[in-house]
Image: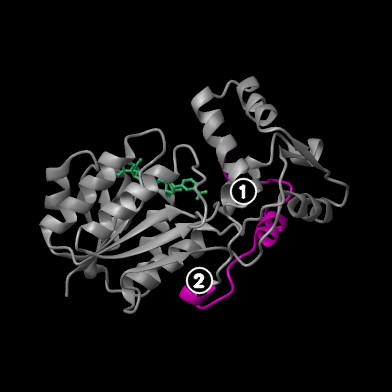
Amino acid sequence: MGKLLVTGATGNLGRLTLQALLTQVPPDRLAGLVRDPSRAADLAEQGVDIRKGDYFDHDSLVEAFAGVDRLLLVSAEAFTDRDTQHANVITAAKQAGVQHVIFTAVQRREDSDARQVGVTDGDIFAENALKNSGLTYTILRHPVFTEVLGGHLGADPYDNGVRVPEGDGTVAPATRHDLAAANVAVLTQDGHENATYTLGGSEAASFRDIANALTEIHGSEVPYVPITAEEYSESYLAQGVPREVAEFLTAWVTAIADGAFSENTGDLERLIGYRPTSYREFLAQNHPRLTQEETP
Ligand SMILES: NC(=O)c1ccc[n+]([C@@H]2O[C@H](COP(=O)([O-])OP(=O)(O)OC[C@H]3O[C@@H](n4cnc5c(N)ncnc54)[C@H](OP(=O)(O)O)[C@@H]3O)[C@@H](O)[C@H]2O)c1
């Protein structure tokens, strides 16, 4: 039996996935792809085979994927050439004899032509490259990570209200912990071949619903304050955020408000076998903090 390899092993999702795998799978079946092995010493100490490779370096990937059966491709970061990186991983996996590649994309609706800047086109490119590669695939489409939701609600929502572009669209944010559990399910179980899952947490909410939840959690009113996309983008520019990043962040909330994330399938709960954490539980647990990170 070949190994299970997780890319991005020094990142949030990849590390959580390997940590969860370590509770279920003998470590000698696990491998992690990293750019800097010194940052994965803890995983190596637990027996994970840490392999060095870069999505931009095709040969390094072919070497790193030797003896791997299933591979989780944690999608490359925004503002980099994601298409080249994803294509390199997929062709290297094929060359190295990997059987099954799992790709993490962002949730989108098949019935919509909406394009989220920096996200949608790259996801479609990678999904098509994978489907055309002849490899067995599984596509896991993610909602907003719960850990970064607070960063999407405008500056200091407990003081200023939820100031976001108007719209009744909903999203069911999911924690990286629960999404990592879904990765484990697909890496370790049969029955997910050539499937596409849309993963969501246990509670879908519009920005108005989120403002109501914050009101309840905070104990004083947190109003929903609809603004235009331009105003939202300007608020980032005023904080010194580069225009490209401001547009990227604005595209996320606009997509949510417009309904691009409104589909809630139950796929995550089915995959992990327990009720995923809801955004409300996460925000209540972290109150008065909204996010575990500086920016989305
Ligand atoms: N749905 C959402 O709300 C949301 C939010 C944020 C991000 N995302 C997406 O989800 C992915 C996973 O999230 P995360 O929180 O785990 O992100 P993260 O902590 O930034 O992890 C990304 C991982 O990808 C690795 N990586 C980046 N470029 C690479 C390259 N050229 N070659 C090899 N490895 C490379 C990074 O390696 P290093 O450790 O060496 O940097 C890191 O380990 C992100 O990359 C992004 O595409 C989604």
Q: Position of residue 143 (x, y in %)?
A: 53, 55
Q: What number is the disc on residue 116?
A: none
Is residue 32 shown to the viewer in this render?
Answer: no
Q: Position of residue 66 (x, y in %)?
A: 12, 59
Q: Position of residue 39 (x, y in %)?
A: 32, 45
Segment tinted magenta in the rendering:
267-295
* Figure check: 170 above or below 160: below
For image coordinates 62% across by 41% down, the residue present is 254
For image coordinates 49% across by 55% down, the residue present is 107
* Residue 241 appears left or right of 220: left
Q: What number is the disc on residue 256?
A: 1
For image coordinates 51% across by 30% down, the residue present is 245
**Disc 2 target residue:** 267
SS class, disc 1: helix
Between 286 and 159, the one lying in front of the other is 159
Q: Quadrant of the N terminus?
A: bottom left
Are discs 1 and 2 less than 8 Å apart at CB? Answer: no
Q: Is mark 2 within 8 Å of ligand 1?
A: no
- Label 1 to label 2: alpha-carbon separation: 19 Å
Q: Is residue 290 magenta?
A: yes
Disc 1 residue crowd, few under 14, some 14–19, many 20+, Cα 10 Å: many
Q: Quadrant of ligand 1?
A: top left
Between 79 and 176, the one lying in front of the other is 79
Q: Position of residue 148 (x, y in %)?
A: 58, 46
The amino acid type of the residue labelled 2 equals: Asp
* Figure check: 195 above or below 96: below
* Residue 135 appears left or right of 265: left
